[in-house]
Every structure is written in C-alpha cells, then in structure tokens.
Amino acid sequence: MKREYFKDKYNIDIGLYSYGCFDIKRIPNNTKIGRYCSFSNSCYILNGNHGLQYISLHPYLYNTSLGIVSEEKIQRTELVVEDDVWVGHNVIITPSVEFIGRGAVIAAGAVVTKNVEAYSIVGGNPAKLIRYRFNAETIEKIESTKWWTMDKNKFSSIIISGMAYEPEKIST
C-alpha cells in the first residue's frame, strides 16, 4: 500500500523489501529504487541545484511550492538505484547522479557526484571508487542467480543453503 502511494503521489518507485526510503524530504520525486535496498535515515538524494544564473539563489525564484512562481524554473533530475544497494549514514547524492548500480555500497559520509558502478564500494568527498565487492567471475555468478527478483521466502532458501555467504561457490 505504501509503495503504491509513493508511486502514485510522488512518482517514487520503491521495490519490494527496500527500506529507509519512504521519506519525501530525503528521496525526491522521479526516483526509482530497486528491491532489497538499504537506505540510512540520514542520507539525502538531491534532484536540483539553485539557479546560479538568476538574480538570487533563493528558492522563491524556482520552487513552485513556495507560491511565487507557477512553474519549475530549474531542471529536476531523475535517479535510478538498482537492487541491493546500501546507502550509508550522511550520504549526499547530488543531482548529477543518474544511476547507482546493483550491489553498490556508498560509504557513510560520501558525497556522490557521479554514477556508481554495480558492485562497487565508493566513499569520500567527492565519492571515489574504493574497490569492488567481488571479482568479475563472482559478480557474473551472482548475476546469474537473479536472487533480487525472488520473494523473501525463496531468497531465504539461498540464505539457509549458505550460498549467500560464499557467493564465489555459486555454480552456474
């Protein structure tokens, strides 16, 4: 029900089992979040910058909700966050980011200014690649399972089998 409400009212599409992202003050319109994502309660996604070319930087010049202008005067961006992404505490994702790949980790305090590759760990200000979570062969094995498309009951069978803890042992 909550997912449908956010999709209909705010065009925020939140996949099943994702949490920490039902907050319109931190997650802006036109954001698509995959399944099994984890968002800290202190991260922010920004979808617009102040109009540097205007006489003032104040939101009165571009924010329709303040009752002065009748149409948006700045460009709003859209963000796609794929499945199983972890966004740490105090992360800021700037309007220049359009895509965060599946399995990515964004370290606490990071300021993300560029797209984030799948299965990468990024951190810092500006966020930079720290390392990949797995080698290419293991990523391929994980991708072949498509586990993120499973419901929690089916996913639990992968957890119980131990495959979730040792992905390099997945057989393709």
Image (cartoon, rainbow, N blue to C red):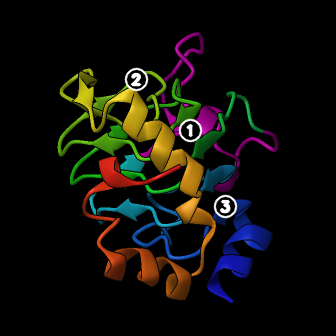
Q: Which residue is mark 1?
A: 47
* Residue pictured at 66% horizontal, 55% vertical: 65
Residue 79 in picture, x, y percent from top left: 60, 40
What secondary structure is found at the residue carrying circle 3? strand
Residue 65 located within the stretch drawn in magenta? yes
Q: Tag 2: residue type?
A: Thr
Q: Is residue 93 visible?
A: no
Question: Decide: marks 1, 3 in contact (CB < 8 A)?
Answer: no
Give the extent of the magenta segment: 45-71
Horizontal and vertical percent for residue 67?
69, 53
Residue 122 at x, y percent in the picture: 27, 31
Using a 10 Å C-alpha cutoff, classify the residue at mark 3 as few (fewer than 14 neighbours), some (14 to 19) or many (20 or more): many
Q: Is residue 164 left or right of residue 27?
A: left
- Mark 3 or mark 2, earlier in chain: 3
Dots 1, 2 in contact, CB < 8 A: no
Q: Mark 3 belongs to which amino acid?
A: Ile
Residue 12 is labelled as 3
- Vertical order, 160 against 172 (above or below): below
The residue under label 2 is: 113
In front: label 1 or label 3: 3
Earlier-in-chain disc, 1 versus 2: 1
